[in-house]
Amino acid sequence: MKALEGVKILDFTHVQSGPTCTQLLAWMGADVIKVERPGVGDITRGQLRDIPGVDSLYFTMLNHNKRSITLDTKNRTGLEVLEGLVKVCDVLVENFAPGVLDRVGLTWARIQELNPRMIVASVKGFGPGPYEDCKVYENVAQCAGGSAATTGFREGPPLVTGAQIGDSGTGLHLALGIVAALYQRQTTGRGQKVLAAMQDGVLNLCRVKLRDQQRLQHGPLREYRQYGENIPFGESVPRAGNDSGGGQPGWIIKCKGWETDPDAYIYFITQAPVWEKICDVIGEPEWKTHPDYATPDARLPRLKAIFERVEQWTMTMTKFEAMDILNKYDIPCGPILSMKELAAEPSLRKTGTIVEVDHPTRGKYLSVGNPIKMSDSPSEVTRSPLLGEHTDEILRHVLGLDAQRIEEIKASGATGGAAKSIAAE
Ligand code: CAO
């Protein structure tokens, strides 16, 4: 048994944000039926391709454990099939541009008529407001949600981060909303609409920066390096480089080999409870009692110099050697691990956080498995579906259609081939 066994998801998602959400639900046991446009499918199947004619890693890594049905939802028969799926599924997940679902004919009122228990979960770029009609991609959300303004170095331009907090982050938020709505439905018997806007999701993840915005009204942010460098603060939270977002100052510093290895760095935290151990390790025992260094407050204006001193020490060893020594003393730190190093990390393979998946046309590839580990609902990662691989199976077993009806549907072009659109009728 898996946690979400018995839950049927009508997955009308594409690109990254929606597929991340439904992939998580699939890993937790939901039956995820991905509806794709005949002949084309999710646009990412063909984007950033590394092997000609083969589903891209972009697609395969976001669509594990799902089934695929091809359906032209702009064709009358296709829409009938889609409505049939609405009747038998528990959740419809979509991340189309605003208004698309209504144009398909699946308004909230129509969905309620078909299945009042249905939960309709959407990712949109923005919630209600001036930008609600805008199309949004990852970096737009990072910029509009406060991440870009607070990422990067103070003297440089805003930066986007490699972590897909706008897409995958919002997919995660949406998945939580869906599970909560399924739980509430047990009491109310009704479905509901669940909305996760990418701007909101990013802002939620930037919560500590809105905290700092308000702290600014009461004085400079003393844990930001610029305080110690006597650089005045402006009206909004500045970019903090690699400063820690919390109360324990930290910074990224060089390790042996940094001249040639772009990832030969370690994140070092001068956590107050282990300050004395830090002084001993780096060879500055007198800092334990020196009035300029002995207390966290005394250290704040001197953070730049302190990290430069720590760096002199870390530059004499690799990031892994530094990690071994610092961990012995309980000093918080973390090596900068490259994707190459992560891909080869045995402990991540062991826990299933990195998995090797076999695919009929691509062969073996690495993917990130389910990062959420449940003791009674372990996840097994199975490959993404080929386009329309499960069309027949879904028509027959999910919708319970007989062979004659399936033939009629196919002859209409709704699942592939040339189909007449409703607009053309
Ligand atoms: N059969 C027939 N038509 C289909 C179909 C199917 N199976 N599946 C989708 N379509 C049609 C839709 O009906 C729609 O047509 P209309 O515009 O004529 O109504 C169209 O395909 C999809 O439209 P879209 O506007 O969603 O797609 P896009 O590529 O132009 O925009 C995106 C992509 C991501 C910018 C937009 O979907 C969006 O803003 N989504 C919400 C925010 C989001 O999730 N962004 C993150 C994406 S991941 O980086």
Image: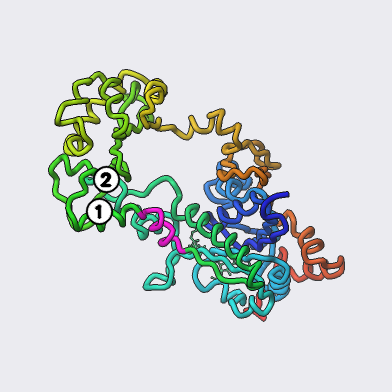
Q: Which image quadrant for residue 425?
A: bottom right
Q: Residue at (33%, 52%) from the top-left corner?
A: 208
Quarter of the image for residue 127 reads: bottom left
For the residues marked 1 and 2, what is the alpha-carbon distance in whole angstroms? Answer: 8 Å
Q: Residues within 10 Å of mark 2 (few under 14, many from 20)?
A: some
Residue found at x 34% / y 21%: 256
Q: Residues within 10 Å of mark 1 (few under 14, many from 20)?
A: many
Give yes or no for contact between labels 1 and 2 (Cβ–Cβ under 8 Å): yes
Ligand 1's image quarter is bottom right
Pinpoint residue 299: horizontal percent, then vertical percent: 20, 35
In the image, is the residue at mark 1 within 8 Å of ligand 1 by its beta carbon?
no
Residue 366 in sight = no
Q: Residue at x 41, y 61 (%)?
A: 199
Q: Which residue is mark 1?
A: 237
66 magenta-colored? no
Q: Secondary structure at mark 1?
A: loop
Q: Which residues are magenta?
A: 197-207
Asked if one can make out residue 272 in the rendered structure from this viewpoint, the answer is yes
Q: Position of residue 260 (x, y in %)?
A: 35, 24
> On screen, 358 above or below 384?
above
Mark 2 lies on residue: 240
Eyeballing the image, is 208 above or below 395?
A: above
* 201 drawn magenta: yes
Residue 50 place in picture, x, y as percent: 56, 41
Nearest the eye: 288 or 14: 288
Which mark is drawn over residue 385? none
What's the residue at 71%, 68% (across, down)?
A: 85
Residue 255 location (% of width, % of height) = 33, 24
Q: Disc 2 residue type?
A: Ala
Residue 358 or 124: which is nearer the viewer?
A: 124
